[in-house]
Amino acid sequence: MKPFLVTPCSSWSLQLPECVDTPDRGYECRLQLSHNWGQYSPFFSIPSEISTAIPPRCQITFAQVLSRHGARDPTATKTRSYYSTIQKLQIAVGEFRGKYAFLNWFKYTLGADQLTAFGEQQMINSGIVFYNRYKALAKQRTPFIRASGQDRVVESARNFSQGFHQAKTADRTPDENYPYSILVIPEGEGYNNTLDHGLCTEFEDAVAYSSIGSEAQQTLLATFLPSVIDRLNRDIPSANLTALDIVNLFDLCPFTTVASLSGAVSPFCFLFSLDEWKHYDYYQSLGKFYGYGAGNPLGPTQGAGYVNELIARLSGEAVSDHTTVNHTLDDSDDTFPLDEALYVDISHDNDMISIFSALGLYNSTGSLSNTSIQSPDAAGGYSAAWTVPFAGRAYFEKMACAGVDEELVRIVVNNRVIPIQRCGADRLGRCTLAKFVQSMDFAIAGGRWDMCFAPK
């Protein structure tokens, strides 16, 4: 498969620019729309105030990527809901006109839960980038790869491997280890898995924690959705669209876009104004922040186990953790080696939000308002689209630099250097390894794991 895609964005308008999805910069089509789709945005490169280049007189000694899976179909529950909305519209309306005209012939064909062809290509591109960025290490090495157990995550790991291998062979380097081994960690009740939450029963089931995100979202919806409902019902008088229908129509924009191999922007995307898309994006960001991030008292705790695994790999010492780590795997050199230089972990958006929160990457964000929207810049670089888009990734780097006695740690999220605030990052966003480890006291202590299980 080709390492990038170029195609006209849509046949619906001759005014649209070309769609481009490249390994380095990601999805760059109708930026003001596509970068406001929350966690359903395809990966795109975030502007960075600090250069992401390897600093002069430094060399990377360790690189680990934590990636979300590639673009997928809706979940089974949502695909049924989307189908119902489309069916309701097409039964109620005799003929659609204007920007709604495509609904005259639109057929709902989205599946459920699986990677799309576009998402597969995203992960191939991601593997290409990882090899090229860390070529000095990758040329003579094979990454140690883990994937959480859902099919789309495992397939994403295979696609990533394909891209890494593709780049390596293009570099005229033998690659006898391909196809690479992938350690799949099962998901489901009772499994310890740092790439998939599920063990902390209070977080999963107690209304005090599990409903915080959706409550924040509902409060925001009340501030902007009524006017959207009124507008669309005026445009389509017999539709009788509800709040759920409108949110479904918003969602169908990114999902029908990534259902196209080329990433052609869907006509659903043009049913809403830019201001409405900004509200939708913030609506999704609230769900992640208060559902799985720092806005939830138990959100960051779900990421503590992964942070402790990262500390172990960076320091070359055995994992110490009493939260979500699977010690059957992590206590074995075969399934959790500590002497590798390249690591790849493929996970989900919600888990990555918890991990970023446990790391303290967005401590400057503060509490997000649920009655007015904030831009990602105003929110300390946080939004769902900026942190966990489809195929979004974080690089954890360790580097040795001339004139510095200790190795330095740096974190890059979707091509944006995130200064590690807890350990007093330097002007390039880095901390010494010792200070980085010391600053991870929240994760080392297990977060608030003691709150995870209500007394029986």
Image (cartoon, rainbow, N blue to C red):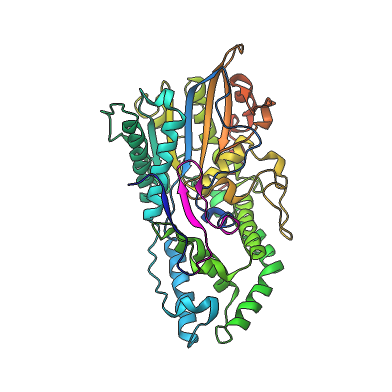
Residue lying farthest to the left in this orientation:
176
Identify which residue, 201 or 139, lies in the foreground. Answer: 139
**Toward the viewer: 242 or 198?**
242
- Would you place residue 427 above or below residue 164 in this image? above
Rendered image quadrant of residue 276? bottom right
Q: Is residue 159 magenta?
A: no
* Residue numbers of the magenta segment: 13-33
Q: Relative to 273, say whether 48 is above or below.
A: above
One can see residue 179 in this view: yes
Which x, y percent locates residue 413?
56, 39
Q: How many labels does the image show?
A: 0
Q: Does the magenta stretch include residue 28?
A: yes
The front one of 307 and 427 is 427
User: Residue drawn 31% across and 32% down?
Assistant: 169
Query: Against 231, is 141 above or below?
Result: above
Q: Position of residue 363 (x, y in %)?
A: 69, 39
What residue do we see at 35% from left, 43% from top? 159
Which residue is at the far front?
14
Q: Position of residue 421 (x, y in %)?
A: 68, 32
Q: In this view, does 454 lie to the left or right of 87?
A: right
Residue 208 visible from this viewpoint: no
* Image coords of residue 344 (percent x, y): 42, 34
